[in-house]
Amino acid sequence: MMNPSWPDSRVMDESCWSDIEHCRAIEKWYCVSKTEVESKAFEFGKANGLDVVSVCPNLILGPILQPTTNASTLLLAKLLKGSQPLKDRTWRIIGTTGWWMCDVAEALVLVYEKPEAQERYICTSHSVHIKDIVDILKDKYPNYNYPKNFTDGQEKKEMSSEKLQRLGWSYLSLQEILVDSGRLTYWTRSLEPNPFLLMVNPTSGVDEDITSITSKEFD
């Protein structure tokens, strides 16, 4: 959520919405579209007697089914490619695991099945600096050219998924999320790939794409 008027000392909860005009001014169109769709859905539900519940996840990491990378996976690829220097920003991460289960999907099923679920739910599990992510990946996959220099990045406001957790939601550890994300074991070529999972190395030939994607959507 992007709301510059939200106090820095106050944790972001479900009462916080992105400031659409601010997002328009800085051309964060992804945030504009997400915010407008969510608000219109609540308006439609209220006008038509529908019980609308929304789940608002942060950066989603996990195994990918398609043979090409997506924006969130490219963020990990950037770390593996060793881009230097790298701003030590804070990431809000939500993880996935396995081929049919994931933390976000569990949150969606939970709010659908629980009759007491209402309105909005922030879905976030970990708040972590990029340098800490590099340290975890380096321990598991030491042969990559990781960034060695980090510059201070702007700290993001804290967010809370307390409301969703009170409903019964839980999530994976940060290590599980990062190790499982993007099928990193297949990127190392240390295992014989299952033909069903065969894919190109997501870290090859993506340098020119990473900067534009991360600067526009994840700064």
Image: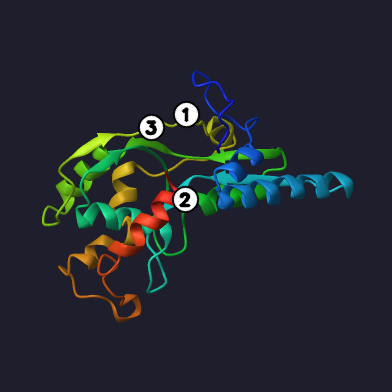
Sequence-wise first label, 2 or 3: 3
Q: Residue 12 location, x and y as percent?
A: 55, 28
User: Badge 2: how crowded within 10 Å, few (<14), some, or many (20+)?
Assistant: some
Residue 141 position within the rendered picture, expressed as x and y whole percent measured from the top left: 16, 54
Where 202 sits versus 170, above or below?
below
Does residue 95 appear anywhere in the picture? no
**Amino acid on which the number 1 mark rests in the picture:** Lys
Which of the marked residues, 2 or 1, is nearer the chain's N terminus?
1
User: In this rendering, which labeled residue sits more in front, label 2 or label 1?
Assistant: 2
Disc 1 on helix, strand or loop? loop
**Disc marking residue 68:** none
- 197 with respect to 137 (left or right): right
Q: What residue is drawn where x is 56% and y is 52%?
A: 30
Q: Is residue 186 visible?
A: yes
Is disc 2 placed on a helix, strand or loop?
helix
SS state under label 3: loop
Residue occupied by mark 3: 154
Residue located beneath label 2 in the image: 217
Q: Quick check: 113 left or right of 139?
A: right
Which residue is painted at 39% across and 60% down in the image? Answer: 98
Q: Give the residue type that dot 3 points to.
A: Gln
Instruction: Looking at the picture, tell me which residue is in the foreground, 210 or 157.
Output: 210
Q: Quadrant of the C terminus?
A: top left
Residue 41 vs 205, above or below: the answer is above
Cα separation between marks 3 and 1: 10 Å
Q: Tell me if 48 is positioned left or right of 93 in this view.
A: right
Name the residue type under label 2: Glu
* Residue under pointer 1: 157
